[in-house]
Image (spheres, grey):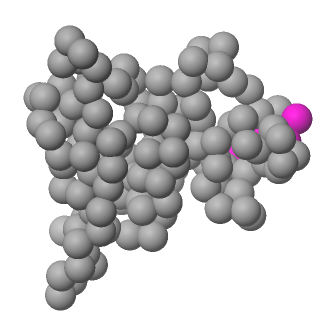
Amino acid sequence: MSMSDPLADMLTRIRNAGKAKHKSVDIPGSQIKIALAGVLKEEGFIKNFKFIKDNKQGILRIYLKYEQNDRHVIYGIKRVSKPSRRVYVSSKDVKPVLNGLGISVLSTSKGLITDKQASKQNVGGEVLCEIW
């Protein structure tokens, strides 16, 4: 059975694994998921990730990050642009998430970048998700 929204599936798996206090979570791989995992690592929301090749599409293993009191670093994840309703913003309409405490990930012509990077580089694009 095919999935209609693989990115929403990835975000849900990360959210559920964090609530269940798992050390890592396995997700079916793709290039955009690897790029999103790279942004999450760069921003400090996950420890690390690695791509495991198999005879199919591969597996993306994400190692989750927790605070001192075993609370997941990611408090919330929200999918903004969906297959049924795409959300695009221009460079001047990019807004911070929770007054800068979170990030939104944009798909631009320069790849997947955060809202802060989009403002600096003066580019807009499709808002994929918000993480705080």
Which residue is more in the foreground, 90 or 47?
47
Figure quadrant of residue 92: top right
Total marks placed: 0
Residue 85 on image: x %, y %: 57, 45
- Residue 63's place in the image compared with 4, above or below, is above
Q: Residue furthest toward the bottom?
A: 55
Residue 39 on image: x %, y %: 52, 48
Residue at the spot 65% in from the left edge and 62% down from the top edge = 111
Relative side of 125 to 45, left or right: right
- The residue range painted magenta reads 88-92
Q: Is residue 121 magenta?
A: no
Figure quadrant of residue 1: bottom left
Residue 43 on image: x %, y %: 52, 38
Residue at the spot 29% in from the left edge and 33% down from the top edge = 65
Residue at the spot 11% in from the left edge and 29% down from the top edge = 20
Relative side of 80 to 11, left or right: right
Residue at the spot 47% in from the left edge and 54% down from the top edge = 38
